[in-house]
Image: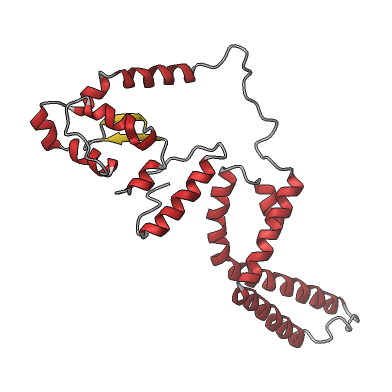
Amino acid sequence: MDEPTSGLDARAAAIVMRTVRNIVNTGRTIVCTIHQPSTEIFESFDELLFMKRGGRLIYAGPLGANSWKLVEYFEAVGVTKIRPGQNPAAWMLEVTSTTEESVLGVDFAEFYQKSRLFQHNRDLVERLNKPRRDSKELSFPTKYSKTHIHQFLACLWKQNMSYWRNPHYTAVRFFYTVIISLMFGSICWKFGSKRETEQDILNAMGSMYAAVLFIGITNSTAIQPVFSIERFVSYRERAAGMYSALAFGFAQ
């Protein structure tokens, strides 16, 4: 999540982060970028990934209760100690500025790379990259989590909702069909009742062919602006494995 509290007042930001915390408590992992968090919001996080200007990592680890692990780590460098009641996030930014680096004569990025925390994180990554000996290779019988019939029904429901939410588009197609039908009906009036000569049969067949072709072309022209938008949406959803092209095509 990219700055979920930006633009919100303190109460709204607290509600958002409380919701995020409740989701995390269900066993899910959420990664957030945060901008100027309050103490309450900052304390709702379990771990922190902190980078200095230039994208160099200077801290990656747990915060601890009241951010004591973060505070202990940076105070070990020799920075100004945190004041009672001070926001740990604001204090962290103050003591890791380039000015503080010049005063202390230390590069926080290099200090992190030489720390036990960095070694612990590197060992953890190496351990997690190696599969267990008794683990089996992951394999899935199909790319999609649902059957083709479920994919088709879901796409059909979505398409039906799209029609109901766009009445102007449906009305234009209906209007075109009615007008063209009336036009061809007037021009080819009683063509089917004239079957005396071969030319009469050809006229009736030609009128039916032209009517079907013209209505199809007109509706295809009307649907192109809408379908061009749906096409890009379908590309994204199909790439995510939500449904197949076959289900999407039949639902149209």
- 56 left or right of 48 in image: left
**Residue 98: quadrant of the picture:** top left
Q: Is residue 237 visible?
A: yes
Question: Residue at image x 73%, y 85%?
Answer: 182
Residue at the top extreme, as displayed? 133
Q: In front: 186, or 153?
A: 153
Q: In front: 4, or 228?
A: 4
Q: Position of residue 56 (x, y in %)?
A: 25, 31
Q: Position of residue 47 (x, y in %)?
A: 39, 34
Q: Quadrant of the image for the C terminus?
A: bottom right
Question: Residue at image x 66%, y 52%?
Answer: 248
Q: Is residue 153 above or below residue 65?
A: below
Residue at the left extreme, as displayed? 103
Q: Position of residue 199 (x, y in %)?
A: 83, 78
**Residue 163: quadrant of the picture:** bottom right
Question: Residue at image x 66%, y 81%?
Answer: 175
